[in-house]
Amino acid sequence: MIDVLKRHEIQVLRRAGHTLEDVATFSGVSIGSVRRVIAEPAVQRVIDAETERERRRVGRPTKVEPFREVLQTALAEDATLLSVELLRRAQLAGYEGGKSALYALIRTLRPHAVRPLVRFEGLPGEFSQHDFGEVVVRFLSGEERRVHFFASRLKYSRWAEVTLVPDEGVETVVRTVVDHFAAIGGIPLVAVFDRPKTVALAWGRDSVVTEWNPTFAAVTLDLGLGVEVCWPRRPQEKGAVENLVGWVKGSFFKQRRLVDAEDLRRQLREWLDDVNRVRPSRATGVPPLERLTEERPRLRPLKVAPADLALRIPISVTPTGGVRHDTHTYSMPPDAMGLPGTLYLYRDRVRIVAGRFSAEHDRLWEPDAVSTLPEHRAQAVAAVSGKRARRYLQRQHLLELGPPALAYLTELIHRRPRAWVADVERLHQLLEQHGDQRVRTAFDRGLVEQAIGAEYIAHYLLRDSQPSLPLDPDPRPPTISADPLPRGGRVQGAGGARRGGAQRSPWTRPSTAASLPRVGGRR
C-alpha cells in the first residue's frame, strides 16, 4: 500500500506538469500506480497508514464486516451489553467466524464514556492520604526480601510518614495511622484510603461502602476522624497527592543501595528527614516543613495516644474458662464461663471484660500460646468436683507451659505410672508459688539431667531462689542444705521400685543423677 505522503507526492508532481513516466521515476512506483493515485481525490490531511487502510477499506474484508450493522444497532439500544451476548446475537444473524475477530470489532464500536479528571488542592488540616505498598528489596549480599510499608501524607503541606510493617491487616492500619498522626502532631478532618479492602467489608456498585470493618470503624469513632474511600484504578477521584506509593518506591526504594534490614530502616529515616525538612516539594516549591508550620494549627489534637489505643473485639468465654483470639488463649475466672464480653487489644497487653469479671494479660505472640493467671488456675482447681477431674485439670495447667512440660510429664508418667498423681499435685503447687517461667526453666533442666520427679523440680527452684554463697577455698564434696527427700521420690523404672537386690544410694546433686544407676525405694 502506498502511504499518504507518497500519494501526495505523486499528485503534486503530476499537477506540476510532469509526464506519467517522469512521475513514476521520481516517486519510485509503477506507472499503473501513478494512474491510480492521480484518479483518487486529492490528499487533504496526513493520517497514519492503518487509519487510512481502515477508512478506504483496503484489503480483504473480514467475516465480521457484514455484521457491523447488527452490532451497531444492539449497542445503540444498550451500550452495556456484554460481548458474549453480542456474539450470540451475531450468531443468530448467521455469523460463523471466531469470537476474537468479533470482539475486536465490538471494541471499536462500543462507546466509551470519558470521565473528567479531578485534581484538587487540599486546604490546611483538611485531608491526609494513606496507602499500603509492597516492594521486593535486593540487598548488597544478594538476598531478596519482600517488604511491606504503610505511607501517609498531608495533602496541603506534603509532609510524609512511611513505616515498615509486617502485614496489611486492620490492626496494622489503625495502629500505624495513629502513630503517623502522633508524629505529625494532630489529625486532619478527613483521611483518604486508596485500598478499601483493608477498611471495608462490603460495598455497592456505586462505590458506596455498605459495611465497614467494625474494628476500623470503632477506632475512627474514638479518634473523631472522617474517612473517605478512593477506589483502585480510579485516578480521577484523587486529589493533588496522587500515586503516594509510586512516589515512595521511585524516590527511595529504587534509588538506594541497601546492606541489610537495619540499613534499610536507617536510610528510610534519613530519606524522610530530607524530603520533609530539606528538599523542596515539586508541587509547592518549598519544603513540607514550612507548610506544616501553617497547617499544624488547623490539625486537631489526637484523642488517643498510640500506647493507649485498644482494639475492641467481641468474644465469648469458653466452657474451659479461656478466651481465644488469633490462635492465643487467655484465662478468665471459672464463674465467667459462657459469658459474652469484649477483648481490648493493646499493643503490649490484653484486657478482657465479661459481665462483672475482668482480667489483664501480657499479650502473647507465639502461635497457639496460652496465658493462665495464677489466681485463675487456683479458682479452676477449686471449682472442679471429683479427685479425677481435679487431678487432670492440674496436669493440664502444667501442660500449658509448652513443649518442655509435655516432654517432662511424659517421662514422669512412664517412669512412675502408679505414683505420678502426687508428683503432679506437688508440681502444681510449685507452679502457683514460682510462676510459669521458672517452672518451665526447671523442666528444661530436669530433661537435660534426666532428673524426673517433683522433688528434683522443687530442689531446682529452691536452690535458684536462695542467694549464692561465697565459694569455699577448701575443695570438699558438695552437700545439699535442703530437706532430705523421701525415698519414694527417687527415680524409678517403668515397672516401679525394684524389689529384690535394690541398693541404697546416698542423695547426690541432680547434675550427677544421670550417671548413677537407677535405684528405687518403697513408699
Image: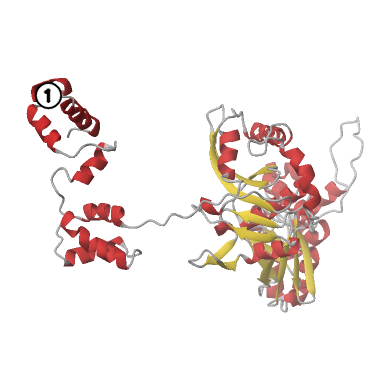
Residue 456 visible here:
no
Observer-nearest residue: 477 or 361?
361
Residue topped by disc 1: 24
Where is residue 184? Give x, y as percent. 75, 46
Where is residue 100? Give x, y as percent. 24, 52
In the rendered view, does 195 fall on the left or right side of 34? right
Q: Is residue 325 above or below residue 153?
A: below
Residue placed at 78% from the left, 59% from the top? 431
User: Label 1 amino acid?
Assistant: Ala
Residue placed at 21% from the left, 37% from the top? 42
Observer-nearest residue: 149 or 284?
284
User: Residue 227 occupies which quadrant of the picture?
Assistant: bottom right
Residue placed at 60% from the left, 34% from the top? 252
Q: Secondary structure at mark 1?
A: helix
In the rendered view, does 196 fall on the left or right side of 384? left
Categorize mark 1 by other alpha carbons within 10 Å: few (<14), some (14-19), many (20+): many
Observer-nearest residue: 340 or 379?
340
Q: Is residue 93 above or below residue 519?
A: below
In the rendered view, does 247 fall on the left or right side of 75? right
User: Residue 478 occupies which quadrant of the picture?
Assistant: top right
Residue placed at 32% from the left, 57% from the top? 110
Where is residue 437? Give x, y as percent. 76, 52
